[in-house]
Image: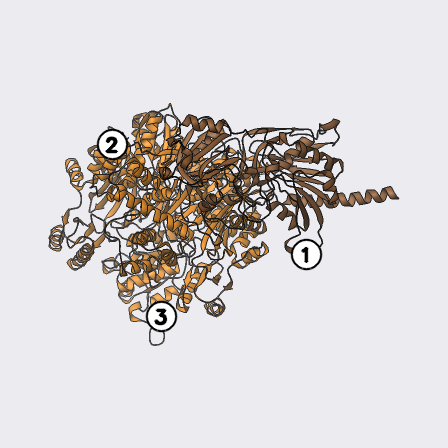
Chain colours: A brown, B orange
Amino acid sequence: MSTATTDTTVGTASTGTATTAPADAADGTALLVLEDGRTSRGRAYGARGTTVGEIVFNTGMTGYQETLTDPSYHRQIVVMTAPHIGNTGVNDEDPESGRIWVSGYVVRDPARRFSSWRADRSLDAELAAQGVVGISDVDTRALTRHLRELGVMRAGIFSGDALYRDGVRRTTDDLVAEVRSAPQMEGAALAAEVSVDEAYTVEPLGEHAGSEPVATVVAVDLGIKAMTPYRLAERGVRVHVVPATTTIEEVEALEPDGVFFSNGPGDPGAATTEVELLRAVLDRRIPYFGICYGNQIFGRALGFGTYKLAYGHRGINQPVMDRTTGKVEVTAHNHGFAVDAPLDGEPVAPFDGGRFGRVRVSHVGLNDQVVEGLEALDLPAFSVQYHPEAAAGPHDASYLFDRFLDLMSTHRTRATSTTTEQES
Amino acid sequence: MPRRTDIQSVLVIGSGPIVIGQACEFDYSGTQACRVLKEEGLRVVLVNSNPATIMTDPEFADATYVEPITTEVLTTIIAKERPDALLPTLGGQTALNAAIALDEAGVLEEYGVELIGANIPAIQKGEDRQRFKDVVAKCGGESARSEIIHTIDEAVAAAETLGYPMVVRPSFTMGGLGSGFAYDEDDLRRIVGQGLHYSPTTEVLLEESILGWKEYELELMRDKHDNVVVVCSIENVDPVGVHTGDSITVAPALTLTDREYQKLRDISIAVIREVGVDTGGCNIQFAVDPATGRVIVIEMNPRVSRSSALASKATGFPIAKIAAKLAVGYTLDEIPNDITQVTPASFEPTLDYVVVKVPRFAFEKFPAADDTLTTTMKSVGEAMALGRNFTEALGKALRSIDKSGAVFHWDGEPVAGADLDALLATIGRPTENRIIGVQQALRAGATVEQVFDATKIDPWFLDQIQLVNEVAAEVAAADALSHDVLLHAKRHGLSDAQIARLRGLGTAGEAVVREVRRAHGVRPVFKTVDTCAAEFKATTPYHYSSYDEESEVAPREREAVIILGSGPNRIGQGIEFDYSCVHATLALAEQYETIMVNCNPETVSTDYDTSDRLYFEPLTFEDVLEVYEAEVAAGPVKGVIVQLGGQTPLSLAKRLEDAGIPVLGTSPEAIDAAEDRGLFGQVLLDAGLPAPAFGTARSLHQAQDVATSIGYPVLVRPSYVLGGRGMEIVYSEEQLTGYVERALAAADEAAGGALPAPLLIDRFLDDAMEIDVDALYDGTEMFLGGVMEHIEEAGIHSGDSACVLPPVSLSVTEIERIRRSTEAIAKGVGVRGLLNVQYALVSDVLYVLEANPRASRTVPFVSKATGVSLAKAAARIMAGETIADLKAQGVLPTDRDGTTIDLSDPIAVKEAVLPFKRFRTADGVAVDTVLGPEMRSTGEVMGFDVDFPTAFAKSQAAAFGGLPESGRVFVSVADRDKRSVVLPIKRLTELGFEILATEGTALVLRRSGIPATVVRKYSEGRGENGEPTIVDLITEGQVAMVVNTPNGQGARADGYEIRAATTAADSPIVTTVQQLSAAVQGIEAQLAGPFSVGSLQEHLARHTGKASA
């Protein structure tokens, strides 16, 4: 497991079994095999070998480095719809975690040469070094249309030795069978696989560097991206990033002004301990902000269900309406699951006979009316399904971090004045 | 929030004539806007002086004024129509400037007209350099260090701090007019001098050089709720120093990381907010230092621009349409994305393909002009291509340019040694074909680093060009054209023709490659432009080809007609042809599925809404054939229309027919009968029609013999392309010898001594009146659309000549003779559809100059002037209907045609607009403006009124800002013209003008009792006491109009200097006697008071009224 700091130590792939390219696969062939039997032939890209995972597509035209290192893509094979990948190479500033998390990478035209004043090395070399099996020269648009129509599914990339068994080219049936033996994403609890083992702290940054923190936040790492604590820290917040297994007592011991749950991979339906932890936070009226997985867990904590989208939202051009202001923001998304909550009205959250009071859907995805944000009306808590930290993506939603700061400060004032009232 | 209910009528201002920097993209945007506003139930009042536009078709607005875009005329229209609002952001800089002028004149306030889609302070903040710098700084961005100056002395002083080279940019000009790089003080004085002149505020910005930096542009939209989206990012392959309009550009940006791209996006949004762009589109340009990433904001345009059209076509996001909706009150989230139907417009398109735009230039028309590309735009058109990668899109875009030398080649041995060094030095200077030089240098073994040092083109792009070279080498070296070799070549953009040349296959090689390729099953697929990289289903069949795996062409039941467009705009083939193509698709849409093939992003025809299906493809035989076959596989295809898009599609007719494709309308044999001199001569002979004598020659001796037997003057032209040498009128043997010797010298270099093809020598009809006719023919019946009488004499290209319809000086007998002759030609050639014939009338003989069995440039003008859509009728004739059918259905009138001239008919004058002031010689002097047999105009306007003088005056106001009403007129005419100018010059003195003349001309005038002041010739130089020459007076702006008819062959000493100075000073210039009398009549009409205005609908109603009466 890797840490989610901005440290750039190269980790080892958990699902890609890299091998050296054998002489008999020197033609560089790679095969992409979907569980429904669809097969694309392309060229090996990055490491040679086998990888299996859930195949999803990402429509961002920039930000491949951030995408590759986003822990939410753990156990997923990512198809890039943008045809040219790798043009700006790889640098040590842009990764969102310490390693590449995607389990496989599918592109059409990898760069032969990178060009950027910030680049240190090529993406091809980086993928190979981190053991990430990829494939290039496939019709990524055809593949995307297939996934759009049939939904995401399991898939495998095979290259080099992996195309052979006992020196004989493997049959499609054999490859499909291997793909089908991989675990499904539904029901997968993956937070433990991506979370930090040890807590660490990000101190206030930029103009706030060295100053007394304006607030202290406990950020539960369910697959957190480096940009998230950064966005808080640049606003003067001290962020304690803690493992997914942290208990409420441990949280309280850090005396936070707010608690944050990050993005992450897996099925929120399987996140029982995280949901319990969040309910304990809500019971204590500690201000809460969640992103992505943190939104789904908030939904479940409130008693709503979550469900798997046919092919998810993965891109950086998604319109979301903030219903509190009526404004539309263009946002970064990466989610395959969504919260099932009524879009209209201010219903009482169903959990435990309304223990958490009223709630409303604060943000809606305009492309398909999916719940993109929740706001508790009787608790200091809100969350969004998308990525205000961006990286990659537009910065339209960064106001949400300010909103979290406001919430913490308002709550603190109110809490203080309530205490004062009680005392008097 | 739905649309505003307090607005019932909107005035839309178009962009006027096509000029360099402002082309038909504004017809595209204006047409979209008018459609939207009408759909919203608003009354649309449109003003545009350009008749060759779709937007000025009467059905696109409620009141269409083809009138000059001047404050005076606009005020009259506003007073008459009383619109609630004015939408000025869709007609380019012309419309925006017109709106500012109306506002400053208090007209908007007086009539209670609200400016929508823009506000004046925002426009000023966006376009005023200093205020914009302040905005950028406030938004956390950086501008190039700079100083604003108002005099040349201030400029020289500023150079001390900024250093050379330095960028010079005048304020408030369009297309970068008047701007440039100053490398030393001489440059600085010259460029600043011009810039101060062009800037309406006499203000010029000087700034530090960012030459060679990476250049980017973002297209944005904002609504009234402050929702902002970036529609498209565009990266220039040519780095800073070349105007974006002249650069090869690519979308999306390909060499930025997300962090860097988001920084540009953040600055853009902050700037659009700070500037206060009300609603609608705008673009912002950036420079990025390739070594450090330092970002500089170059400029913004607070309106829909040329790049908005490009961005719309590149992404499928219709910027102009959405801008119009935002202007009337909608917000982005309320407007559905047309293409997906289910998602809103408040998103940012994402591309799963690469778009490359390549500019098309016309330097061959201006041999004296300096062809270095600078920050002043010089291209006249552009082609766009899409592919699944950069190399595929680039290869397609280059072949879309449709010009020899425009595509990569591997002919001959690569250069080496000193030649390579020379080549590297050459490509350091940006020019039209630099990209080919880059490819050749890399082919010759130059490294990417060397080429980057020379050009500053990003190494990633250079490596991609190197990749094409490697693929080409693989093709050349392969044992045979295997499946893999061919697929690899096609995936990187090589055409069958390029592969054939690489394989050393002969002229039939392209066909061989095609057969082998098809035998291997290597065929393109057609993908869809869907704004969302396939995330959602697209409902709009907007396709491009790619050598990929899955095709998306849907099956179809209705029979289809494929219409071939005209490709990139060029001089002689522009918006007029797009107009005809669009009309064809509109006319056929009821009966057929219409399919458009074109590669010009500026046009209405490439709007995905115009036809049932759009293929954004090069107009080459290979690409058209693949589209045809893909559509045949999808459903029945009736055939292909080639005669509406000009010469480009017409030239494909024969090969398409040979490939078994039904060519609708006039057959390729009939096209030959009109184009081949011998065959056409026979047609004329059979019909008993005279043509000017002609002959051909391959040597000087032959040429002299032919010319002597025909008699001088003669019109000489090569029947092949040779270094831009074009047609010339030759008056003497001496002049002929010079022409042929130059041709031989050029041939020496090109083809070893002999003329590769004969020279064509025609009798030149001096003092002839030229007549243009557009007609329809269905095999039995002719409909004569219009007869146009040229104002200039024959010998000036019909495209450059002003003309009037109906003919003002032809008799009924002459018109009848024209009708009979046209019918005989139509029948003899075998026309099915449109026919254009040019005649010359001399001494009562009607000579046939040439006939073109296709849509002509004048079709839209005739259609606007007469209210009859010839192109629509032509399309239906081509599809099999007869003129009788069309008359029965009311498509063509039964009671009149172009030969019936009613006394009450309005008069329409077409005037050409010329681009001379864009071009400079290498020494920085303006190029000669004399008109000749080579067409050089970029666009046209129409003046429309009840009589010729007023219509002519309006045409001049629309084209050049109007004729002078007082001041000094300088007259210097050739001897043969001296008698003819006496009367009109006399009239000018009566009108109060002062006459200046050269000695010879003054003598003639004084003898006729006209007072004329003699001024010094340029060749005489300034007098002892500093008396100025005529050139000095013109340059100082002391001359209101110049009358200068050239002596014999064009550019001779004094005449040239006079015309160049006049062009540079922007004064009206008259170069023919006929033009002079028209100008005098026009001045009289102008002095008689403000123009009255009439809409096309009013004119049309009169016709209909007459018909029903």
- Front residue of B378/A204: it is A204
In this rendering, would B9 be left or right of A39? Answer: right
Quadrant, the N terminus of chain B? top right
Vertical arrangement, residue B483 with respect to residue B409, above or below: above
Q: Amino acid at mark 1?
A: Gly
Residue B423 x, y percent position in the rendering: 30, 58
The residue marked by circle 1 belongs to what chain? A
Vertical arrangement, residue B200 with respect to residue B59, above or below: below
Residue B783 x, y percent position in the rendering: 29, 32
Tell me which corner region of the image, top left, top right, bottom left or bottom right, holds residue A251. Answer: top right
- Front residue of B605/A34: it is A34
- Front residue of B419/B395: it is B419
For residue A210, the mark is: 1
Q: Amino acid at mark 2?
A: Ala
One can see residue B611 in this view: no
Q: Amino acid at mark 3?
A: Pro
Quadrant, the C terminus of chain B? top left
Image mark count: 3
Tell me, yes or no, whether dots 2 and 3 are on the same chain.
yes
Tell me, yes or no, whether dots 3 and 1 are on the same chain.
no
Tell me which corner region of the image, top left, top right, bottom left or bottom right, holds residue A392. Answer: top right
Q: Provide the secondary structure element on which disc 2 rests.
A: loop
In this rendering, would A169 be left or right of B132? Answer: left
Query: Disc 2 to disc 3, how far (Cα)?
Result: 67 Å
The residue marked by circle 2 belongs to what chain? B
Q: Badge 1 local density, few (<14 within 10 Å), some, or many (20+)?
A: few
Residue occupied by mark 3 = B1028
Residue B174 x, y percent position in the rendering: 44, 53
